[in-house]
Amino acid sequence: MSKPEKFFDDKGLRLDGRRIDEIRPMKIEVGVLSRADGSCYLEWGNNKVLAGVFGPRELHPRRMQRPDTAIVRYRYNMAAFSVEDRIRPGPNRRSTEISKVSREAFEPVVLTHLYPSAVIDVFTEVLQADAGTRTAAINAATIALADAGIPMKGLVSACAVGKVDGKLVLDLGKDEDNYGDADLPVAMTQDGDVTLIQMDGNLTQDEFKEAMELVKVGCKQILEIQREALKGKFDQFDTEEIEEETVAEAPKSEVEIDETVEVETEVVETEEEEVVETEEKVEEEVVADDENDEEPDENTDDEDVEEGETNE
Ligand code: UDP
């Protein structure tokens, strides 16, 4: 791919038709991996990322455990087929660095002190990369953590801002990332506290301030999408429960009613037997209690005597 001749058209729109303060379309699916405690599949433009959370679970080897807190491990990995040129499988300098800074992006929000000696593992896998994969992975990881029920002070949202042809733009596309003047990935909490900031290229102080304002707008938009995704997941649970209740209460067909009557009759019989048995047991227990009642009185007297003796 070569450098585009210009990054903006006559209307000031970008190569993919976006405005300078517009993020790429984002789609989030929650709970996509059955073996993970929490998971998320996220598409952002042409990025496709999967996140899985495992834990909190006991950390092994035990010598790594922290008695006062859980530790969070974060893995960012790009699939070999995720980019144009195949990537050699396994960790490399770039993925190690991204894993480290992304873990740190969650440090201030995950309530690790609630799980001493435990570990919370976050795995992010980039299946298709198209610029902004570290921020995409963080956005997916937040949802996976929430899906796993990990207590957090709030969600983390991440987005990059950059400079292209002297203009600040939100959420860099591939060409903007490759041939732009600056790239600034940022993650922040829902309260606007920055938990990750990196910078590639140069910005003046004023540009930096403006860039931070712009990226705040992007993170807010992403937070809304994340919230909607989580709400969708939990609303779905509510609906499923309501549906189950409705099915249980709904009038049955004639055949079903007959079957139900038989079953209910059996249940009634069982209940009657149980009632009789229970009554017998109660009677036995009452008799036993009556017999036992005498002993505690004696004991109480003994205790009184002992207490009296002690007091004297
Ligand atoms: N990229 C690539 N090969 C690599 C690393 C990155 O083709 O080994 C591409 C990929 O599309 C990635 C983009 O370059 O999204 C920008 O990479 P960068 O290191 O800036 O991280 P990102 O923006 O993805 O967080």
Image (tube, rainbow, N blue to C red):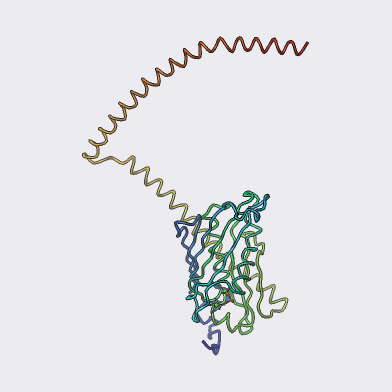
Residue 167 rendering spot, x and y as whole percentages: 62, 81
Residue 148 rendering spot, x and y as whole percentages: 52, 54
Residue in view at x 36 percent, y 24 percent? 274
Residue 73 rendering spot, x and y as whole percentages: 60, 61
Q: Quadrant of residue 282?
A: top left
Q: Nearer the viewer, residue 297 or 204?
A: 297
In the rendered view, would you say 67 is above or below 90?
A: above
Residue 34 rendering spot, x and y as whole percentages: 44, 56
Residue sitting at the far right: 312
Is 258 left, or right, of 15 in this rendering?
Answer: left
Residue in view at x 55 percent, y 57 percent? 145
Residue sitting at the far left: 255
Image-quarter location of ligand 1:
bottom right
Q: Nearer the viewer, residue 184 or 78?
A: 78
In the rendered view, would you say 110 is above or below 307?
A: below
- In the rendered picture of this protein, how many numbered marks are placed on residues? 0
